[in-house]
Image (cartoon, rainbow, N blue to C red):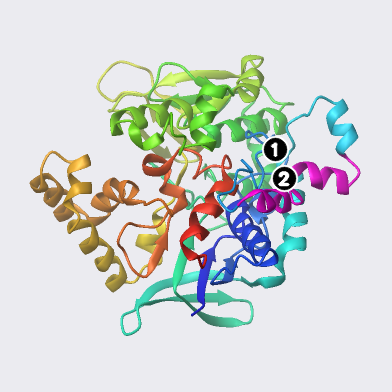
Amino acid sequence: MQMKIIVVGCGPKGIAIQTKLQVLKKLHKKPISKLVIIDKKGIAANWGGDSGFTDGENRLCTLPDKDIGFPYSSIFGEQVNAEMFKYSWSSFLIDTNKYREWIERGKPQPLHKDWYEYLKWVWERTNTNTQFIKGDVTKIQIVPTNNIWNIKVKTDNGPRTVKGNSLVLTGPGKPIHTKLSPPEDENHLLPLIFDGKSYWEKKFYLDHIKNVFRHNAPSAKIGLLGTGETAATIIHSLLDELREFNFKIYCLSRHVSIFSRGENYFGNHFFSCPDDINKNWQDYSLKLRKEFIERTDRGVLSTNVLNIMNHSEKIEIIYLNDNWDVSIEGSKIKLQPDKNNSLKSIHLDCFVDATGFDPLIFINDQFDDETRNRLVNHIIQNEKYILQYYNSIKDAQRDLGLDPLILIKNILPLMIGKDLSVDGFYPKLYLPMIAGLSQGPGFPKLSALGLLSDRIFEPLIEK
């Protein structure tokens, strides 16, 4: 019996899954999967510069060699590695006559828009067995009679329904709003409030932003909440787009400084080879794994971005403690770093919440009540995972009473199994975006796309 896998998101992960399926079929590995990919914006659209998340001009933080087949050590053998390499970053550069130049320029990190062109190049060569639907997923539900996924999609041609045995959810999710949310009315221009997605979308209003800054020069002030890569790309854009102005960017942080992460073999090894027999990711305690992710992934910047920031006199770090607050006062945003002491408040002309994205927002936004409750009940029944996070079942029940989403966000990342699906939950629900803590830090990132597709397909291949 053939299975149909539905993938929501046609970015690097969706394209990597598609490419591996194409290769396996070519080599007669007898995959038992049909593939449907759904994306609201289009093929790899988040990287192109027109769909939010980036303007396309920022540099890729991950090495481009870590492409859709990396690390090229497939469990399916050397033939699969060789076939996958035909869709590598290097093969793309050779095919587009750019390889020599890239080598002779010292292998520079590509721009996001270059990565977008690469992903489209792969897609065009591997999508023959894939059904693609451009549309917005509006509802995710389980049909209890036959235990399959039922996905409602809004398309330009009207509503569609897609059914499948397994569901893979990819993509960053929705922006996190810590204190202030951007106005939903696109015609509402003041005050200037953005998040990690709307900043790029509302760059259509860049002339308006410049007019505000021109009026307030030389004292224009920007508050930017966050010190991770989301914040870094926006800082880089602000320094470039507003270079004609005299302004200040206040980096608002829970830390007293900004921290960086450079590439090194010892750390990278866990991203690309979490199954290493000598350094297996799961052999380390949950505490050590959390510490590793905090140090190498969350709230840290690439050395390239940090060098740009080091050379700018327009950036200042503002430490925020638990009592900080921000509020709207007319066309300004009032920042209070600490409501309980004498630290002076700052009136900002622009506020950007760049704390990142919530990859589990679909549970609240798209899951219907019955499916959400089914997932919550499944979590409650797995005490071994609950007790990895909580001291007692009673503590978990307390959070469940406050808000079931608290329990889901605390426990679900611990329940991701080797195939990147929720352990014991059916129909299969694959969540690579939260697999870092349980399976390896590379799965939510771009660091092990070839391994990611291996993990999903291994149990689905006829032996």
Answer whether residue 447 is magenta in the image.
no
- Disc 1 residue type? Pro
Q: Mark 1 near mark 2, Cβ–Cβ under 8 Å?
A: yes
Position above or below: 148 against 177: below
What is the magenta range?
Answer: 77-98
Quick check: 33 left or right of 411?
right
**Residue at image location 53% in from the left, 21% down from the top:** 260
User: Which residue in the protein does label 1 denote?
Assistant: 64
Q: Which residue is mark 2?
A: 115
Residue 142 quadrant: bottom left
Q: Mark 1 or 2, which is nearer the eye?
A: 1
Q: Is residue 41 left or right of residue 458?
A: right
Name the residue nearer the viewer: 195 or 191: 195
Closer to the camera in the image, 246 or 66:
66
For residue 290, side relative to residue 166 (left or right):
left
Label ID, residue 255: none
Q: Where in the figure is residue 351, as x and y percent of width and height?
A: 50, 36
